[in-house]
Amino acid sequence: MLPASLDEAVEALAATPGAVPVAGATDLMEAVNAGRLRPAALIGLGRITELRGWRYEDGGTAVLGAGLTHARMDRPDFAALIPALADAARTAGPPQIRNVGTLGGNIATAAPAGDTLPVLTVLEATATLARAGGTREVPISHLLTGLDPLRPGELLTWVRVPLLHAPQVFLKATGRSGPARASASVALVLDPARRAVRCAVGAVAPVPLRPLEAEAWVAGCIDWDARGEEGAALIDPAAAAAFGEYVAGACIPDGALDGPEGAGALAARLRRTVSVLARRALGRALK
Amino acid sequence: MTTTDPIDSGAIDPGTVDPGRLGSGPVEADPRGPGPLDPLGFSPVEFGGDGRPCASYILRVNGFERPVTDAWIGESLLYVLRERLGLAGAKDGCEQGECGACSVLVDGQLVAGCLVPAALASDSEIATVEGLSAGGAASDVQQALADSGAVQCGYCTPGLAVAVHDLLQRNHRPSEVEARQALCGNLCRCTGYRGVLAAVQAVAEARGTEEETGEDAAVAEPAAEPVAGAPETTEPLAAPVEDTGIAQPSATQPVAPQPVPPVSAQVAADLPPAGEMPLYADSEAWVEAEALYPAEPTTAGTGVGIDYGTVTVHQTGIYEPYPGYTATPAHGTPYDSSYESQSSYEAPYDAAYDTGYGQSHYEATPAHGTAADGPVYDGAPVHGTPYIPTPAHGTAYAETAAGYEGYDGTTPAHGIHLQPSAGGTSISEDDHA
Ligand SMILES: Cc1cc2nc3c(=O)[nH]c(=O)nc-3n(C[C@H](O)[C@H](O)[C@H](O)COP(=O)(O)OP(=O)(O)OC[C@H]3O[C@@H](n4cnc5c(N)ncnc54)[C@H](O)[C@@H]3O)c2cc1C
Ligand code: FES
Ligand code: FES
């Protein structure tokens, strides 16, 4: 089925038990081809044009359609709006995948290596879920952690992202030089108004992690007043490095390092990767 | 721009397309809407003999309508094209979206055919590799791939042909980085991609020359424009497809020789580059590769720009030497004395051969007990010579007979920063910040 409007889609979803909504199908068909999924019916969302764009809302918020493709988010106009999300979309697979893979699909799949997820977490986005006869708003983190999951018959329609006019960075480490899923990723934003730093680490756990203590600590190490001055050092390099270690230690607990030989070594390597990513992300945000 | 793709006829005008809709192709592409031709539109799902949900629909492939009946809704476009419609050009490499062998165009978008549910593509324009070639001949892209050695086992080739075609349609002059980024979803286990990149450049150049020729012609004889073969200059090749009525995609016209009508050439030149923004090149989101290839900032992640020296065209079978490389001399050529600077051999070798090693730098091992003339060891002291006594605990080093030069006798307290020595071994951090 290819409903042309949101209302038709939620009605069709309610009327067809077992029907699966399909956006870009990059995750869905992977599961079907691998024999993990046998859908009773498919409801294509590709024709719901309203979900494929974005709009502004009361000045400070961007409302992104769930049907925005990664390729679309990578383009300069969008990158000017939410640079970290554009960076995440830019690295989310090869062109064949990014041409059709969507923001909504990335969130609904909620894969550990989903690249938009740490960015949305760090931006503290909220999702609008629509079902026949109503909608509700859920913070992305509640959706991802299962605190308030997507229910049967619900469609993810919009993602509200507060627009921060401040540096934001997404960095990703992968196992090869071509497009690949993240082995670790870090999203970091500065909030100069509140003199805060927010950071989320992706791909190392089932959901993106927020190292809150490290965030609070490093915010105190930053010389916020020097911002904009020529050649000003906003943070001591040693403090930035310590921030990296702090984040990595918070996300990969010591217990993981004591695992059986191979696992322990892997965890140690991952910790180092996260540490470097976090340090660099902070350095770039403060550049 | 030359193309045989019917999908191209809808030329997207960026001005009229809702920004969020770009992904869905030409605005007017589907005049039929969810009518009787869209059997999926809200009709209850049928069930096949084995109880699986099935659907019947019509696919528009390379400009032709191809009915598909009673197909399981989970079938991928790749499967339907190959197994039901007999279009075996797109290959099944992984069914997981990783390899790109199944690349096709859906509504002008390069996609992995294996990840498209065929039933949901029923209102889309599908273009496959079969639609690239004209009348059984290879398209310019395919020919260039073959010519530049980009084809070995050939399994990746149809996917690459579609991807290269798509790239050149959006970006007439892709740089090597752009080409690599555009083709990074197409894996080739055989050729190492150099040939593919060469093919991209070859086609881009050939088409560029064509366009220039077309422009020249336009300047020289503007009156000739209407008779250039296609009055509707924006879609010069669309008409023949409909006229033939033959249900074979091969009925299109040859691609390469068609001169580009001047108007469309100008339009193409005026368009802002429609290519993908560099994927990783300008991205800060690419970390590991930066460490691997620090040489070129613009190429992180793609492996592009590593200077392989002046390697000449790949796959010619003739390797031209790197500059500075001296060819191995032919068998029997006498040694150049510069080859072994210390060598006292003279050609021909046998001159010194019979007279032993006298002329070489080899010196016989001296007899046991002979004093060695090296600077290091000057003989063990006579038995009984007393050692310089180790100083008492706490004695400052400078007081010892052999006080170390430059050492001021004190280890700095823990935590005091050491001044990096002149030869500086301080670790410079790769911070990129
Ligand atoms: C080769 C390959 C490489 C990839 N690399 C990356 C990568 O580097 N980074 C990354 O993050 N991802 C990657 N992915 C995963 C995938 O491309 C993304 O997760 C993509 O965003 C999924 O979007 P989609 O539109 O294709 O989702 P779909 O496959 O259409 O849907 C996925 C799931 O979400 C549900 N769904 C979709 N839209 C909605 C909605 N609006 N409301 C409710 N439910 C919905 C569907 O029912 C389905 O269960 C890769 C995939 C492949 C095949
Ligand atoms: S078969 Fe589709 S990408 Fe490999
Ligand atoms: S030629 Fe064999 S995979 Fe490319």
Image (spheres, coloured by chain):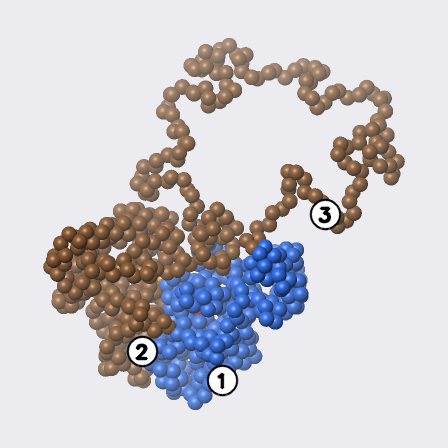
Chain colours: A blue, B brown
Task: Tell me whether circle 3 and circle 2 mark residues in contact (CB < 8 Å).
Answer: no
From this view, report whether residue A7 is shown above or below residue B393: below
Q: Nearer the viewer, mark 2 or mark 1?
A: 1
Write down the residue under mark 1: A136
- What's the mark number on residue B54? 2
Q: Which mark is residue B417?
A: 3
- Location of residue A191 by image quarter: bottom right
User: How busy is the neighbourhood of tag 1: few (under 14 within 10 Å), some, or many (20 plus)?
Assistant: few
Image coordinates of residue B101 in percent, x first then y, are 34, 59
Viewer-side label of 1, 3: 3
Which residue shows up at 42% across the image and 14% down it?
A: B348
User: Which amino acid lies under the numbered mark 3 shown in the image of this protein?
Assistant: His
Residue ranking furthest to the right: B392
Quarter of the figure that contains the C terminus of chain A? bottom right
Q: Is residue A141 above or below residue B281?
A: below
Tell me the SS state at disc 1: strand
